[in-house]
Image (spheres, coloured by chain):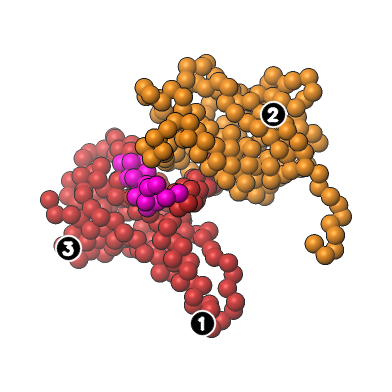
Amino acid sequence: MPRQCSETCLELLALELVRAYGRQSRVPPAAAVDAIGFRTGRQLAERYTANRARLGEPLEVIKFVCKEFWMEVFRKQVDNLRTNHRGTFVLKDNTFRWLAKLSVDPAPPAGAAATRAVASVAELARDYLVLPCALVRGALAHLGVNAAVTAEAAVPPACEFTVTIKPR
Amino acid sequence: METINAEIFTLTYGSMVRQLIADLEDISAVNKQLDEMGYNIGIRLIDEFLAKSKTGKCGDFRETVDRVAKVGFRMFLNTTAAVTNWNAEGTECSLILEDNPLTDFVELPEGCQNLVYCNVLCGVIRGALEQVSINTECSFVRDVLRGSDVSELRLKLLSLNKEEYPFKDDD
């Protein structure tokens, strides 16, 4: 069994990464966090696929990411996968683990204020989704699928990842 | 405690160090940044430690360091550290890390020989202890990645903040 460590370590590292890069101005924060995740995603995919047959079609690669990669990194499988059959895939995770503990200051009850509070958790989530998007993009790239990955969490912790395969 | 495969954490950390080297272009600035990030992690990590470790109050600094080495390292990194080399006053000691998951897969390239790759740990310990009113200084004095046979963290007690009881009613 591979070596284990506490999940908190990764959580706090991801949190601090966003904070530290958000504060300095030399490099665009999202670009740096993206680069970090992309490298890690590639390395993880390499390790997870070392002892198996090569994955061929993009669909096969996406399925691998939805099941095994997601399981390893995000501790569960993707709940729903949709595609338009023209290179766009939508991966829906109903309880995305990395957003589970995200919260903003408690909002006053009911009315317009409550709606605003939810919107701001979604906004907060945007910063914290850069890293997971980059991990997924890195894994796909390692498996030969060149794609753009974006994520939207309208109602966290539910989250939708959109993978758009780039034409060769 | 929820656990994950350590390689996800280890590789993310490694990738982050690489990025910091590329962005800051100066190894000593990277060391400083790692320590600062560790500090920020430490001040949050202590909450988790206190909530989940089910340990009581420490009597003195010796006991505190033992708790860090045996319970803290076990809980978060699934390893332990040995505590040695106490000074006579009991204010300074060394933590020896024989098995450190952070250094899995790591080799320092040419030009990075001054990098204190695991400096984040110093910050974490300093930050966590500061939250329980213990001011310390922490630094690596030996490092396996730079050719030593073990990694050694030197931990020095600076001061204990007094907690004043009872708190005033209007605080």
* Residue under pointer 1: A112
Label 3: how many Cα within 10 Å (few below 14, some 14–19, many 20+): few
Q: Say which residue appears at 74% left-offset and 43% top-offset.
A: B133
- Say which of marks 2 and 1 sits in front: 2
* Residue under pointer 3: A85
Q: Are marks 3 and 1 in contact (CB under 8 Å)?
A: no
Residue type at tag 1: Ala
Q: Are marks 2 and 1 in contact (CB under 8 Å)?
A: no
Q: Chain of mark 2?
A: B
User: Percent x, y for residue B51?
Assistant: 67, 50
Residue A163 visible? The answer is yes
User: Percent x, y for residue B141?
Assistant: 58, 22
User: Which structural element holds mark 3?
Assistant: loop
How far apart in space, not on screen, are marks 2 and 1 (Cα)?
52 Å
* Residue under pointer 2: B156
Q: Are marks 2 and 3 in contact (CB under 8 Å)?
A: no
